[in-house]
Image (cartoon, rainbow, N blue to C red):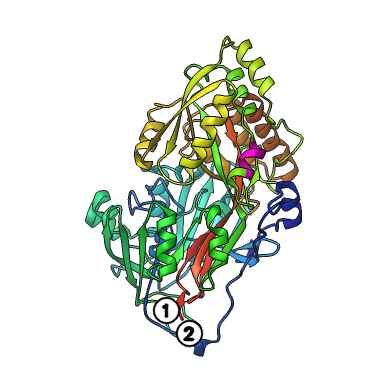
Amino acid sequence: MSQEGKVRPVSRRKFIRAAAITSGGLALAVCAPRSTPAQAIKRGGQLVASKQWTYASLDPHLTSEPEMAGYDALFNTLVRFELVDPKTWEHKLVGDLAESWQQPDPKTIVFKLRRGVTFHDGSEFDAAVAKWNLERQRDHPKAQLIKVPLANVGAVETPDKYTLRLKLKSDSPSLIRLLAFAWGAKLRMASKAAMEKLGDEGFARNPVGTGPFKFKQWVTDDRLILERNPNYFEMGADGKSLPYLDGLVFRYIPDPTVALVDMRAGSLHVLEWILTKDVATIKGDPSLAIWEMPWAGQILFFGGYNIDAPPFNDARVRQAANYGIDREGMAKALGYGVGFPYYYPQWGPAALGWDETILKYPYNPAKVKELLTAAGYPDGVSIELKVISREPELTIGEFVQQMWTAVGIKTKMVSQERLSWIDAMRAKKFQACFWRGNLAQPSVESDSLITSFTCGSPSNWAQWCDRDVDRLMKEGGAAMDPKKRHTIYREVFQLIQEKAYLFTGIAMPLMTSYRKEVQGLTFDFQSPTFHRAWLR
């Protein structure tokens, strides 16, 4: 494979037809950042960004939330995605710390690494350090998301100082792409010297990478402050080392409505994952713009059941709950003109395995009654729905509470702070729960779903387990023939739907807003990157 392996483009028309993304409401334009003449670029200044998520750790290997812009500011990866055309959604794979790569056979991947790169502590990046990073992320007992797809990596070899060779346990047509995907196997390179000096806990609060920005201060549950790395290896359009900015601040503002007030006032420059209810307000503000990422569509109502305890240990009760979701009504009430009904577990129309003829669970109160009666609950059933205490989850939870209760699934909503919610999920102290999920992307096909659908995998928040699904996901990930992989993943898709392990309701295009004085903003698939950003 060449350095710039193109990713199969998505048919925007097909997706919009399938999802009705603009029906009955606002249609959003995809605004691509424009190139700027070098002489117009202004260096200096501090950019402030915000997201509803907080950092639990600054160790990129052990995080439970890999899609955080601060990680990409601090660390580099072997490969990354670069947007080719926002209209067709085409992305290509480009080198970051890897200058080139090839897959000479289905079980071998060889990377040629960039020379002359140093970490923020002055230590050198080379193949031995890259090997240590991969093995730590694969083998560390506290590693969460990334270790699942990396489990297929056997021996990690360093034939010379700048060559990294991976020997895989089974055929893998997709691992290279997964190494660029945050919810796949994104491998961010940390300083081995700093880790050995500080230990796991020390490094988690004082991270050291090779990225365009280096660590300055972290105020837990408030903000992460970074400063310019003067020795960064990439060059700007003005012939000088990137980045253009002097510093970055990532603020934790759990209420996006509050964050929007700050952005309109000018104290915040970039707001990730905006609420759909705020789209009209943002579009009406001449100082703001929206970057829409329909290729990273977000399922805002996506959840599952505790299938090991009553009442959801009975598939008929799970099926009843799925039939009790009024997706059309939810989209009209909560979609603000850009949300659309969604019936399937993460699969998007362009992903391998997609088949819209598979069981959908349309809203059907009579079917709910029939299934509950057959399961031994003729008078209905009482359940708890656990949600994260933030928007839009709280509003969605209240809607679902009323919706399910109306069809005989009497629902009590229990809200928890995000980290407490995660603890409850890990301990299986729930009956039903929901979270946010992304559609399976054609850029990584369906292989990344192994972290969501297999037994014990970290994004399988509801912790359901089906050994047939595990077997099929493994077979799909090893099949080199795309047609065979499509057939296998379709079977996974069908199994999950028929057994009603998961539920969905509405989906949205992912959107980030920013002030128009922010120039050069780019995105690594769906996460903003700031190495070329500057303030006008």
Residue tagged 2: 41
- Earlier-in-chain disc, 1 versus 2: 2
Mark 1 and mark 2 residues within 8 Å of each other at the beta carbon:
yes
Q: In this view, does 235 lie above or below 198?
A: below
> Does the segment drawn in magenta span residue 308?
no
Kindly state the secondary structure of the residue where label 2 is placed. Answer: loop
Q: Percent from the top left, x then y, of residue 458? A: 45, 38
Image quadrant where residue 494 sits: top right
Which quadrant is home to the N terminus? bottom right
> Does the segment drawn in magenta span residue 329?
yes
Count the marks: how many?
2
Label 1 Cα crowd, 10 Å radius (few <14 / some 14-19 / many 20+): many
The overriding secondary structure of the stretch rendered in magenta is helix
Q: Is residue 235 above or below residue 273?
A: below
Q: Percent from the top left, x then y, of residue 459? A: 48, 39
Residue in the picture at 57% in, 41% down: 449
Residue in the picture at 55% in, 38% down: 302
The numbered mark at residue 244 is 1
Label 2 Cα crowd, 10 Å radius (few <14 / some 14-19 / many 20+): some
Task: Look at the image and tell me whether residue 400 can be seen.
Answer: yes
Q: Percent from the top left, x then y, of residue 242? A: 43, 77
Q: In this view, does 145 lie to the left or right of 314?
A: left
Q: Is residue 194 left or right of residue 429?
A: left
Q: Which region of the structure is painted magenta?
A: 327-332
Q: In this view, does 366 lie above or below 260?
A: above
